Image: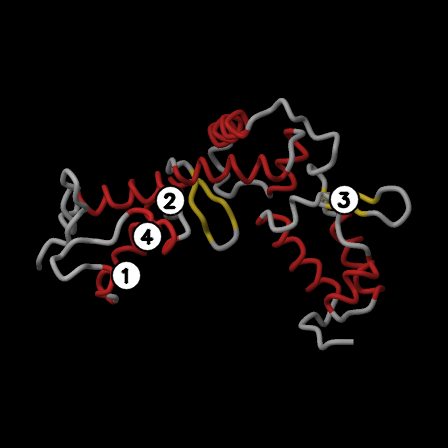
């Protein structure tokens, strides 16, 4: 059995929860079998059973027939007629109705509440991140107005840091790398990168794009 980084079922449950919340496991809907996951991670089947049980108590997993475990909100009964834009609108309403709450409920809880897949919730949260409604605090999603950075602000800060520390992002003539390159560099959408660059433009750090050419770094 290969060496495993997991020494307790609670540690394994937390790692699986992160993978589910991030969408890493959403596509399959069905979790790996207890034996399969145990062999893959080099842990005992008992540890996997206890980890799955802990996630079941949190409402993240549900046990199907036999030994099948499924992700709540990613099952076949999730509503397919609700778009991620609809979910984003409901999250905005939740933020308005709960001004005392800065932290958004978990993806699993939102999927269960709105009867949609975790994938749909993930798309809705990305939309709200790009639009500046939500920010990130570690793995948690928070309202941007709570003092946490929006996704646009996060990417703008990342570009500032890159331009200050890595001159290869600027051509000899002062022109910046293109939006697609920043999208890959920052793992961000085109809309988010455009918003971040526009923010740096208002700060006087870069110029506006010119016809047929990109933005330039302002000499300092």
Any mark on residue 70, and which? 3
Tell me the quadrant of the picture where the N terminus can be found. bottom right
- Asked whether disc 1 touches disc 4, contact meaning CB atoms under 8 Å apart, the reply is no
Q: How far, Cα to Cα, is label 1 from label 4?
A: 12 Å
Does residue 188 lie above or below 163 as drawn?
A: above
Q: How far, Cα to Cα, is label 2 from label 4?
A: 21 Å
Q: How far, Cα to Cα, is label 3 from label 4?
A: 37 Å
Tell me the quadrant of the picture where the C terminus can be found. bottom left
90 on left or right of 185:
right
Q: Residue at x 73, y 36 (%)?
A: 75
User: In front of the other: label 2 or label 4?
Assistant: 4
Mark closest to the chain's N terminus, 1 or 2: 2
Mark closest to the chain's N terminus, 3 or 1: 3
Looking at this view, name the residue that lies furthest to the right: 66
- Asked whether disc 3 touches disc 1, contact meaning CB atoms under 8 Å apart, the reply is no
Colour theme: secondary structure
Q: Secondary structure at mark 1?
A: helix
Any mark on residue 181, and which? 4
Does residue 158 lie above or below 74 as drawn?
A: below
Residue 151 at x, y = what percent? Answer: 38, 45
Looking at this view, name the residue that lies furthest to the front: 212
Q: Which residue is mark 1?
A: 162
């Amino acid at each position: 059995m290969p060496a495993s980084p997991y020494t307790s079922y609670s540690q394994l449950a937390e790692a699986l929860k992160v993978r589910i919340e991030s969408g890493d496991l959403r596509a399959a809907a069905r979790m790996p079998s207890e034996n399969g996951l145990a062999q893959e991670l080099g842990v005992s089947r008992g540890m996997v059973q206890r980890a799955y049980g802990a996630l079941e108590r949190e409402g993240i997993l549900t046990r199907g027939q036999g030994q099948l475990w499924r992700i709540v909100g990613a099952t076949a009964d999730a509503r397919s007629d609700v778009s991620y834009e609809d979910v984003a609108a409901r999250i905005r309403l939740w933020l308005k109705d709960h001004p005392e709450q800065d932290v958004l409920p978990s993806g699993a809880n939102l999927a269960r509440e709105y009867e949609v897949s975790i994938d749909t919730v993930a798309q809705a949260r990305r939309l709200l991140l790009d639009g500046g409604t939500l920010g990130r605090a570690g793995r948690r999603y928070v309202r941007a107005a709570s003092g946490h950075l929006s996704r646009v602000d996060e990417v703008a800060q990342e570009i500032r840091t890159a331009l200050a520390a890595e001159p290869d992002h600027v051509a000899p003539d002062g022109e910046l790398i293109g939006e697609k390159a920043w999208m890959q560099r920052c793992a961000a959408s085109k809309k988010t990168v455009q918003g971040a660059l526009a923010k740096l433009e208002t700060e006087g750090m870069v110029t506006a794009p010119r016809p047929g050419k990109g933005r330039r770094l302002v000499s300092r």
